[in-house]
Structures are given as structure tokens and as C-alpha cells.
Image: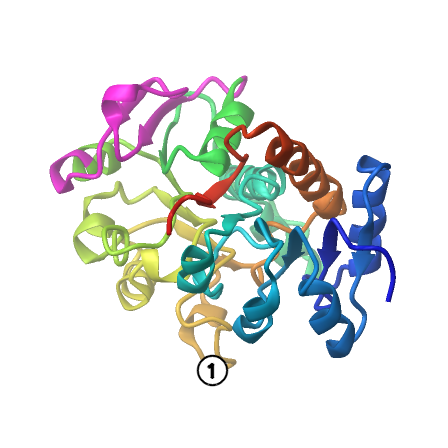
């Protein structure tokens, strides 16, 4: 069809973003390489067979049988649970993800939700809709304690943006001995979580979903929070027990919640969370950014160079020797 491709961009887009734009960003960063965009299933079959690097949401396992040159699959998502990891491992193909590229937007949205509750902006919006000029009380973020659950790229970005608000920060991470950017760092043990929550006006959930974190914020944790506390979930819906959260919000056990993710997701139209004034909901938009392809292309372009030098790949989730 054409000269052998160095990088093949698969046709399926993400978040309403054009794969053509992604391919152009890669071409800008890899002027000496052949970056090909597969626009049809037939082109995908033909191009993947000769590619050194393939990038997209996922790839059909059948296409890998003839992909003898393939060294790297660069997933355009942060999560890779939908990717045929075993097939890549069997073939000695490295896999990287898009971890970190959404962190600024997610962190800004988390801070926005914290400030909305602090200054009760949502009550102001409600009164505006009713054309109701009537004063209400607000509070200050200054002097509050904010617990950030998870100190990966998103959690770190949240903590960085909290700097300057004069708050105390507690970070929760798997390896608290490593320390972190927060004033205090604790582990995921139940006692440590409960102690942190008992002292927090705000809890920002920014950790991955796994066996340890599923249901992490449940009935006991919500009861441990002060009654003026707010839970902000930027991560994955099942980390927070939805039924327990509805109960806590209805009975004013906590002041409120801001959810960019829910369980179930999408949230059904008849779900009780929709009708709770102390629950702000956005439809999993925290990670949306116009810089998606720019940031991802930076990572993938650096990794193409690292394939040549033999350095460890950035955002690597499967090493090439894992077979």
C-alpha cells in the first residue's frame, strides 16, 4: 500500500476527538517517521501487520497474528482492562497507557467542586433560577483539612492546586513510607482511613479502582466524616458505596457530594441522586481537555525514541520482555 509504517493510528476515536488530529500531532513530533492513519477495517488489517507501533483504544487480537514487527501498543486510555494484555505478553509487545494526561482537568474540576460547596455557589445558582435575591451563608476553605485518596498523577495535581488555599492536606497512598506532597501521608489501612476522614472537611477520591478500593467509602467511612464534610469523587463510581452515600446525603450525615463518576454509570434517570440538592453531578467530564492529543502524542513520540535507545518506556503497563 505504502512504505512500511512506523506508527499506525487506529480509526476508533475517543471523547469526540478526531484520530486525524492525533495522527497530525504525532507527525509533528516524529518528522522522520511514517505515521499512518488506518481509516477502514481493511486498512487496519494491512497496516497493523507491518507496524512497529500501534496506538488506539484497543486492537483486535486477530490482527496481531501477522504483526511480526510490532514492539509497542500505546493505548489512548488510562485504563487497559479492555486491551488483550495476554496476547501482547505472549508476543513480547510492550503496552503503555495515557495515564496523567487528564490530571490537570480532573484536578481543576475537583477544586471547582470544593469551592462550589465552600462558597455554596450551587445555592446561588438555584436562587438565580428562581429570581430570588436572598442572602445565604457561606464558609471558607482556608483552615480546612482536605484528604486526597490516591497520590498518583491526579492526586498530586489536586494537592498542587490546593497549595495557596492555606489548608491542611492528608494524602492516602499504598506506600506511605515514601512520603508525598501532602502535610501528612497515611496508608489504606481501615484505621488510618478512618482517622484521616474524622478530621476532614473535604475528601477527594483520586485512586484507581481495584479490589482494595472498591467500596472504600462506605457506610462506616461516611459516618466517620464530620457532618459538614463533602466527598468529591473524581475516580471511579464503585469506590464510593452509592446506597450508603444516598442515605448519608438524605439524612445530612455529611454536607454534600460532588460526583463526576457514579455507580451505576450512566446514572439512570430515576436514580435518587438526581433529586438531592446537596449532590452535584457531572457526566464523567472531568478528564475532558482540548490538549488530550497533544499530551498523549508527547508521550508516544518520546517512547518511539526510547524503543531505539532501549530505555524503559514512559507510562509502561506491560514490559516487552514479559513473555
Residue shown at the point (37%, 38%) measured from the top left: 150
Q: Secondary structure at mark 1?
A: loop
Taking the image as shown, residue 271 lies to the left or right of residue 36, namely: left
The question of residue 99 being in magenta is answered with: no
- In the image, residue 131 lies at what x, y percent? 72, 59
- In the image, residue 27 lies at what x, y percent? 84, 44
Residue shown at the point (28%, 45%) measured from the top left: 227
**Extreme residue in the bottom direction:** 270
- 167 w.r.t. 116: above or below: above
Q: Closest to the observer: 311 or 186?
A: 311
- In the image, residue 98 lies at what x, y percent? 58, 46
**Extreme residue in the left direction:** 191
Q: Residues within 10 Å of mark 1 (few under 14, many from 20)?
A: few
Taking the image as shown, residue 122 lies to the left or right of residue 261, namely: right
Taking the image as shown, residue 79 lies to the left or right of residue 15, namely: left
For disc 1, the marked residue is 270
Taking the image as shown, residue 2 lies to the left or right of residue 219, namely: right
Q: Which region is colored magenta? A: 164-192
- 23 w.r.t. 310: above or below: below
Q: For the N terminus, which image quadrant? A: bottom right
Q: Closest to the observer: 16 or 12?
A: 12
Amino acid at each position: 500500500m505504502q512504505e512500511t509504517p512506523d506508527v499506525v493510528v487506529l480509526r476508533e476515536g475517543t471523547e469526540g476527538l478526531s484520530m486525524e488530529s492525533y495522527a497530525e500531532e504525532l507527525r509533528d513530533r516524529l518528522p522522520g517517521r511514517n505515521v499512518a492513519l488506518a481509516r477502514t477495517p481493511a486498512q487496519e488489517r494491512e497496516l497493523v501487520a507491518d507496524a512497529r507501533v500501534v496506538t488506539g483504544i484497543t486492537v483486535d487480537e486477530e490482527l496481531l497474528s501477522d504483526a511480526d514487527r510490532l514492539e509497542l501498543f500505546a493505548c489512548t486510555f488510562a485504563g487497559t482492562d479492555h486491551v488483550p494484555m495476554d496476547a501482547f505478553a505472549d508476543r513480547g509487545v510492550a503496552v503503555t497507557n495515557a495515564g496523567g494526561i487528564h490530571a490537570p482537568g480532573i484536578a481543576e474540576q475537583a477544586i471547582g467542586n470544593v469551592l462550589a460547596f465552600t462558597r455554596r455557589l450551587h445555592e446561588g445558582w438555584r436562587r438565580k433560577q428562581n429570581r430570588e435575591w436572598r442572602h445565604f451563608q457561606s464558609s471558607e476553605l482556608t483552615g480546612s483539612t482536605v484528604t486526597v485518596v490516591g497520590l498518583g498523577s491526579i492526586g498530586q495535581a489536586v494537592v498542587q492546586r490546593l497549595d495557596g488555599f492555606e489548608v491542611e492536606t492528608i494524602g492516602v497512598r499504598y506506600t506511605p513510607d515514601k512520603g508525598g506532597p501532602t502535610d501528612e501521608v497515611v496508608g489504606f489501612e481501615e484505621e488510618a482511613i478512618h482517622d484521616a476522614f474524622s478530621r476532614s472537611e473535604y475528601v477527594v477520591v483520586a485512586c484507581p479502582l481495584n479490589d482494595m478500593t472498591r467500596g472504600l467509602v462506605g457506610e462506616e467511612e461516611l459516618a466517620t466524616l464530620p457532618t459538614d464534610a463533602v466527598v468529591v469523587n473524581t475516580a471511579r463510581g464503585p469506590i464510593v458505596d452509592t446506597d450508603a452515600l444516598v442515605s448519608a446525603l438524605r439524612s445530612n450525615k455529611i454536607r454534600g457530594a460532588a460526583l463526576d463518576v457514579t455507580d451505576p454509570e450512566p446514572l439512570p434517570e430515576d436514580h435518587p441522586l438526581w433529586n438531592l440538592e446537596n449532590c452535584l453531578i457531572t457526566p464523567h467530564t472531568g478528564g475532558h481537555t482540548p490538549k488530550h492529543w497533544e499530551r498523549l502524542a508527547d508521550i508516544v513520540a518520546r517512547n518511539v525514541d526510547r524503543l531505539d535507545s532501549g530505555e524503559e518506556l514512559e507510562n509502561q503497563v506491560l514490559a516487552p520482555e514479559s513473555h
